[in-house]
Image (cartoon, grey):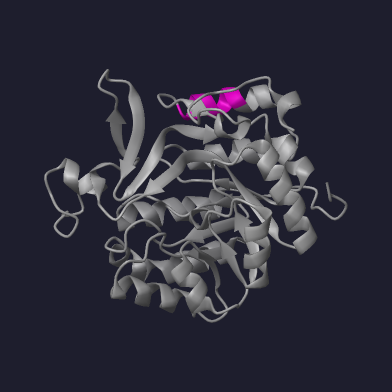
């Protein structure tokens, strides 16, 4: 692996809020992130549903300014689905924010950004070296890989990225984003249409639980998005991710104490604690929600694989 010029510590990043949290909740959340966490980069913006964006759009400049004053890098994330003229306009406007850094999550954003430097989010589904090379040639300098990629594939992507001078980011905490749809599952579950949803998704700030017919928790529904029921948590894998050259470790906002979550992963990335202590602390923070890492080990995503460091490669 090409590791000679790697930073000693991978950046700790915070992905965009996936849920329909109230404006007040968002403001309070980002105030804590700014003042109380060692997070290096924060992604802002509505990625799941364009109808939610107006509820907090006016707060974004103030939130971004506070984060920047606290020493954080701020990146604006675009919609994962662009299906209407209005959504195309929103995406185009974001891609032309002047000097602001953006993360593209839909190919419509690639057309609008027209080769200028940008980041790629996990919804762009960069699964192989050829795709990475093509998109890097169009201005992508940083890529967050899809959460379902297994460890060996991540290693290949990190090697290819190093050769291209591209940063590679991996989600290490939070519900895995599995799929998005043109239909809104949330609205339909409450007998409503997507156009007349009345923002029912706000009632489920950590996603709507979906169980099997036997009553086993299975998935989470978040508007048009399907997520894992478990919190993806790469803990023992952090040392391996650093070794292969992953430059960013992404946490996804959940309805838990994210300040404490960030502290665990900060200690872990700096080698201040062992993985068993990190697992114990994280399990206490996320009580009631199982942790998983199956995708990384080429297995069903919901599974939790332990003591597997030797099998990563």
Residue 61 shown left or right of residue 23 in the figure: right
- Residue at left 36%, top 74%? 88
In the image, 231 versus 216, the foreground residue is 216
The residue at the far left in this view is: 191
Residue 151 shown left or right of residue 225 in the figure: right
- Residue at left 27%, top 41%? 204
- Residue 235 lies within the magenta run: no
The image position of residue 136, as x and y in percent, is 66, 67
Whether residue 246 appears in this view of the structure is no
In the image, 55 versus 81, the foreground residue is 81
- Residue at left 62%, top 66%? 135
Residue 233's image quarter? top right
The image position of residue 297, as x and y in percent, is 62, 30
Whether residue 175 appears in this view of the structure is yes
**Which stretch is magenta?**
279-286
- Residue 280 lies within the magenta run: yes
């Amino acid at each position: 692996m090409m590791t000679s010029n790697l930073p000693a510590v991978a950046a700790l990043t915070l992905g965009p809020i996936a849920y329909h949290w109230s404006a007040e909740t968002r403001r309070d959340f980002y105030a804590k992130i700014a003042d109380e966490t060692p997070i290096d980069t924060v992604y802002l913006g509505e990625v799941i549903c364009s109808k939610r964006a107006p509820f907090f759009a006016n707060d974004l400049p103030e939130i971004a300014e506070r984060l920047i004053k606290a020493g954080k890098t701020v990146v604006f994330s675009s919609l994962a689905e662009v299906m209407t003229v209005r959504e195309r306009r929103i995406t185009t406007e974001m891609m032309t924010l002047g000097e602001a850094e953006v993360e593209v999550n839909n190919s419509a954003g690639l057309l609008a950004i027209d080769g200028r430097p940008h980041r790629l989010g996990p919804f762009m589904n960069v699964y192989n070296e050829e795709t990475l090379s093509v998109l890097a040639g169009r201005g992508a300098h940083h890529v967050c890989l899809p959460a379902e990629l297994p460890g060996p594939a991540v290693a290949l992507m990190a090697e290819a990225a190093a050769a291209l001078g591209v940063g590679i980011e991996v989600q290490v905490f939070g519900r895995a984003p599995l799929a998005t749809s043109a239909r809104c599952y949330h609205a339909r579950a409450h007998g409503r249409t997507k156009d007349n949803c009345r923002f029912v998704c706000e009632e489920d700030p950590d996603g709507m639980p979906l169980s099997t017919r036997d009553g086993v928790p299975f998935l989470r529904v978040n508007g048009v998005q399907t997520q894992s029921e478990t919190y993806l948590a790469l803990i023992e894998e952090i040392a391996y991710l650093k070794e292969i050259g992953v430059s960013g470790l992404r946490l996804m906002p959940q309805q838990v104490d994210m300040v404490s979550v960030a502290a665990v992963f900060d200690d872990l990335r700096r080698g201040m604690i062992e993985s068993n202590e990190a697992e114990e602390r994280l399990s206490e923070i996320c009580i009631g929600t199982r942790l998983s890492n199956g995708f990384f080990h080429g297995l069903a995503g919901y599974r939790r694989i332990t003591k597997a460091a030797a099998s990563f490669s």
